[in-house]
Amino acid sequence: MVGRLLLVFATAAVLAAVPAARPVGASTGSSWSVVTTPATGGDDILLGSTCAGTVSCWAVGVTIYNISSASTFAPIVERWDGTAWSLQPTPALPGGNGGGFFDATCVTTSDCWAVGAVLGAAGGGSPTGSLAEHWDGTRWSIVPSPTPSGAVGAILQSVTCTTRSNCWAVGFGTDDTGAALHALVERWNGASWSIVGAAATGQAFDQLDSVTCATTTDCWAVGAAGAVQQNPNFLPIFPAAASDQGLIERWNGAAWSVVPSVSSASPDGGYLSSVTCPTAAECWASGSVTTAAGTAGSTLLERWDGSVWTRVTTPDADPSGGNILGAVACTGPSRCWAAGSSGSFGGGGGSGFQPGAFVEQWTGGSWSIAPSPTVGALAFLDSLTCARALTCWAVGSASTRPSENDPGLRSLVEGLTLPASASQGLLLSASDGGVFALGAATFVGSMGGHPLNRPIVGIAATPDGQGYWEVGSDGGVFAFGDAGFFGSMGGVPLTRPIVGIAATPDGQGYWEVASDGGVFAFGDAGFSGSLGGVPLNRPVVAMAPTPDGDGYWLVGSDGGVFAFGDAGFFGSTGALRLDQPITGIAPTPDGLGYWLVASDGGVFAFGDAGFFGSVPAQGIRASAPLISIEPTPTGDGYWIIGSDGSVFSYGDAQFPGSLVHEHLAAPVTGASW
């Protein structure tokens, strides 16, 4: 989840001399590196980021034109397609107004939100209302969002979604100067945004800067509250209110309430910018311990252990002060990062504004400063997001050509590609319900040792890898970890047995598929069609969803491929004579191709799917039928899995181990990564 740092739109002259950073590719080691980004010609500041997958990420913020005088503001949106960042068009704001984005989130590749604020006419001045825009897979469009009564304007600082029809955005109402008044919480119900009451803090002023949800009934929001308004001079990424303290609120499915959190001893205060939860019982909130003047002092990280919030020791990048962790993100309980800036803020702007960006990392025992680029004397990071356990992005802004009248702010993106050992893993399920976690996969339970009405035939993992579902041939579904139970065909008479299960991209639903091509949708899984009742040459053996979950493919044992919803047809082996039957299908990360695998390990690639090898091509005769093919997160490789637990790795797939030397009580029937 991204970090939230309030923005009051104003101007400043930045005098620090800053050398340009040398753009390089994303690091594939343990350090961050600067990645090339496009420029608008104005002063570009990225404030939010999100990823719908490894080849679909977004960074949003604000562009300031004529920053030295008569400034105007416009939203900026950049997109990562797996190769490069590019600018994306957004609709003109009504009435000639300006505005900017503070955060973004994606449910799927075709369902994203960006939130922020609308400014006065001609794009200058203070906020006049909140701003919400939606991405439908093709374009961004403005969606009405309310402004609270009693406020002149509003800023939405953060947004998160648990499903397509359940999103939260938080921020605050503003007065005529753009300063914060009271916390603002809005909820999307699938049709419209509406205001939901935030918890009463008992303070004169309060605001919320970040929100995240573990489930639809368990959300967290953080910010600050106190007797003094937050009103920074230049950017809303820095606190500016003496004696205010950090604020944490929790949603229990019915109402928001204040949860006790860390308070700093007077005259110091606190300010929380970001919150994320790697598990339901573990969360992190980041920000700064503020000075007596209300500005950033030392780094602040609080940890939720399922019962209480406590402060965890963190290093400061600059011992002289000005340290703030504006964003925190995790790929698991023992792997987190926090990003921000340190050094002189000059009151949030002006000639003393010379922050430096830095990143900290958590490895399960302590926080430490992580290797990251020295961009120059003026740089700050405002948001962090990670695509599964593969790639992380930190975004913000840096000055490349400062002058007396123009700070020369340009979008700053730093990338980190995690080693394969941290991002690659496989889950194998056996017909008796046993589950085996290989590589980086996590074991959270199984049906092994439990009586089953019918054998297990498939497994599907949740998007964060912290849970999974097993499915039996009778349609019974068993949920483990953070996987929710959304229904099943267990107990319902079936014409033909279930042969597989596939999860929706957001993990809030799944499909079951039967051998006659019948498809059964649960949770937020959409029904896009099926082959039930259609004569088939051979039985259906597997299904795979598109990246946005708005379609899927079914494949028959003869290699016939059937596309539904927004799934494209890229070819099949239906008209070919096969040595062995097809047993599995897997899509590429962008959904523009797929692989088929046969029981002898033969691989057939279609669309943009690359061929990286197969079992027969190696001259290997498998000792047991091959039952599944699973792609790597990048799509530049795959694993082929056998019913004896054998695993064959191709392309960038690392060998995660296998079960061939284990004594299996039952054959492997399903696999997922």
Image (cartoon, rainbow, N blue to C red):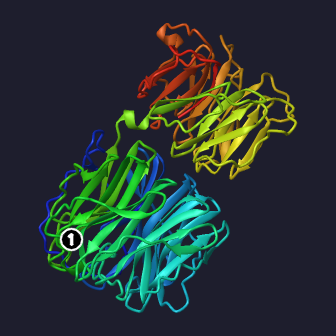
Number of marks present in the image shown:
1
- Of 375 and 666, which appears nearest the observer? 666
Q: Is residue 13 above or below residue 114?
A: below
Q: Residue at x 28, y 43 (%)?
A: 27
What residue is pinned by disc 1?
Answer: 322
Q: Which quadrant of the rendered structure holds the N terminus? A: bottom left
Residue lying furthest left: 17
Q: Is residue 383 above or below residue 617?
A: below
Q: Position of residue 601 (x, y in %)?
A: 57, 16
Q: Position of residue 320 (x, y in %)?
A: 13, 69
Secondary structure state at the residue bearing disc 1? loop
- What amino acid type is highlighted by mark number 1? Gly
Q: Is residue 641 above or below residue 359?
A: above
- Of 370 and 449, which appears nearest the observer? 449
Q: Position of residue 197 (x, y in %)?
A: 58, 80
Q: Residue at x 43, y 82 (%)?
A: 206
Q: Where on the picture, by quarter, is residue 490?
A: top right
Residue lying furthest front: 307
Q: Is residue 79 above or below residue 46?
A: above
Q: Where on the picture, by quarter, is residue 628?
A: top right
Q: Residues within 10 Å of mark 1 (few under 14, many from 20)?
A: many
Residue 383 in sight from this viewpoint: no
Is residue 219 toward the left or the right of residue 246 in the image?
Answer: right
Q: Position of residue 321 (x, y in %)?
A: 17, 70
Q: Where on the picture, by quarter, is residue 251?
A: bottom right
Is residue 488 toward the left or the right of residue 508 in the image?
Answer: right
Residue 670 in sight from this viewpoint: yes
